[in-house]
Amino acid sequence: MMRSADLFREAKKVIPGGVNSPVRAYQSVGLEPPFIAKAKGARVYDEDGREYIDYIGSWGPMILGQADQRVCNAVMEAAKDGLSFGAPTAREVEMARLITKMVPHVEMVRMVNSGTEAVMSAVRLARGATGRDKIVKFSGCYHGHSDPMLVKAGSGLMTAGVPSSLGVPEKAAEDTLTAEYNDLSSVRELFERYTGEIAAVIVEPVAANMGVVPPEKGFLSGLREICDQSGALLLFDEVITGFRLSKGGAQEYFGVRADLVTFGKIIGGGMPVGAYCGSRALMETVSPTGKVYQAGTLSGNPVAMAAGLAQLKILDGHPEIYEHIDNLAQRLENGLQSLVEKYRIPASVTRCGSLCCLFFREGGVRNYPEAQQCDTALFARYFKGMLRRGIYLAPSQFEAIFIGDAHTESDIDKTLQAADETFAEMKAEGLF
């Protein structure tokens, strides 16, 4: 059996940077990544035999925990009948019906293969339906790696300190307008400057790719009002918040209607999948019923549908799961805040539902410029101490902590103990 260090050395010979997604590289925290061998419940295990409490959960979708037996059983049963058909299946219909039942204001669903593809397709639909070209997004919000969305994006781009990407032509991004999250005036200014040209406003209802930045009171409803007044569409990117804040996602949680919604791998139980959804009138502009073209051979993959159906049915039938994970996240938030005060750390804790973040910046974070002021060196030192103590966090200041149903109060308490020990070391080193 090869150890993580050996695997990483071999990986760099055949995979750019040794990883298939940049944030996995651990460059921002000055480490090499552990290679994960298996996972179960709230634990992951690396190739070196180390056990960690998992707060990544495959970046959010493992809301029931890793390798949930009910989901795994559904996958194994579906796989017996075939892995891919490139043809309609009954499970696609059942999945679409379930999503329309659970999510407010959704009447039709188109399955795709990733969150990136869902956003790309929804933006095309918004442009086709309105006959307009320009899109408003927010600094620090990440909507996948399609060319028009790589403008002041969050997530891995923010970690690397890169505001955009090489290979994106200026013309591909010239119709992407950028506003500041939690700042309605910046949105109004764009609508005044480009009257009648803006097709949609796309937003993460909770900005969870620059840490966890909740919307301030009136922000989302203000976006709804601006879109209604201008004839633009409001697009909620719920790749992270969908089925996590509540079984109806952010629309239910915040009581704000979106015209289009995108979902990611949570609707596949962690398998590669995505979807975009909306009213019947909007969705029927998509081919073959309409002139907005979008296709995908693997869309609605039968095994992914089986996994997603198993997970969503559990979430739909057990609302107590949301109470459990929100309570655990609050326990973590309160504990971390107490430690910040105990050690007088220049940091703050934010939470929205089961999403949590420790920002190494005093006074909290409400937008991208404030997130950029975080002390990433302090975060890297904290991350190393936590990893050494068996706590598996995202290797970036600008990612969320994901709490799942498999976590327990004991897990949270062990995590807080690890944080206490790490902060004590950092204090002794004179870091704050």
Image (cartoon, grey):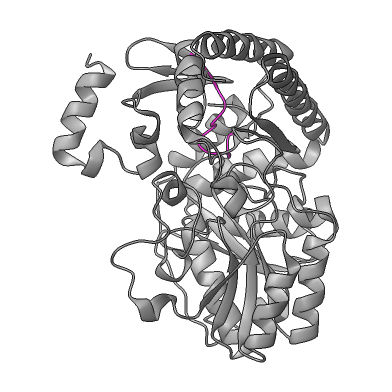
Q: What percent of the width, then of the height, locates residue 195?
A: 67, 90
Left or right: where 58 falls relative to 225:
left
Determine which quarter of the picture holds residue 330. Answer: top right
Q: Relative to 306, say whether 93 is above or below.
A: below
Total label count? 0
Q: Is residue 190 visible?
A: yes
Extent of the magenta region: 52-62
What's the residue at 69%, 86% (across, down)? 192
Quadrant assignment for the C terminus: top right
Indicate left or right for 167 with 155 as reference. left
Quarter-of-image position of residue 86: bottom left
**380 vs 101, nearest the viewer:** 380
Q: Nearer the viewer, residue 285 or 300?
A: 285
Image quarter where the N terminus lies is: top left
Q: Does residue 270 sit above or below 410 in this rendering?
A: below
Residue 282: x and y, percent? Answer: 67, 79
Furthest toward the left, the residue is: 13
**Is residue 88 visible in this depiction of the protein?**
no
Seen in the picture, residue 241 relative to 176 is either above or below; the reply is above
- Residue at 51% across / 56% down in the picture? 115
Q: Residue at x 72, y 77 (%)?
A: 188
Prevailing SS of the magenta stretch? loop
Residue 47 belongs to the span the image colors magenta: no
Q: Which residue is at 64% across, 87% downward? A: 193
Q: Position of residue 223 (x, y in %)?
A: 76, 69
Against 330, residue 95 (above or below) is below
- Residue 365, image x, y percentages: 67, 44
Question: Taking 428 as reference, is 11 left or right?
Answer: left
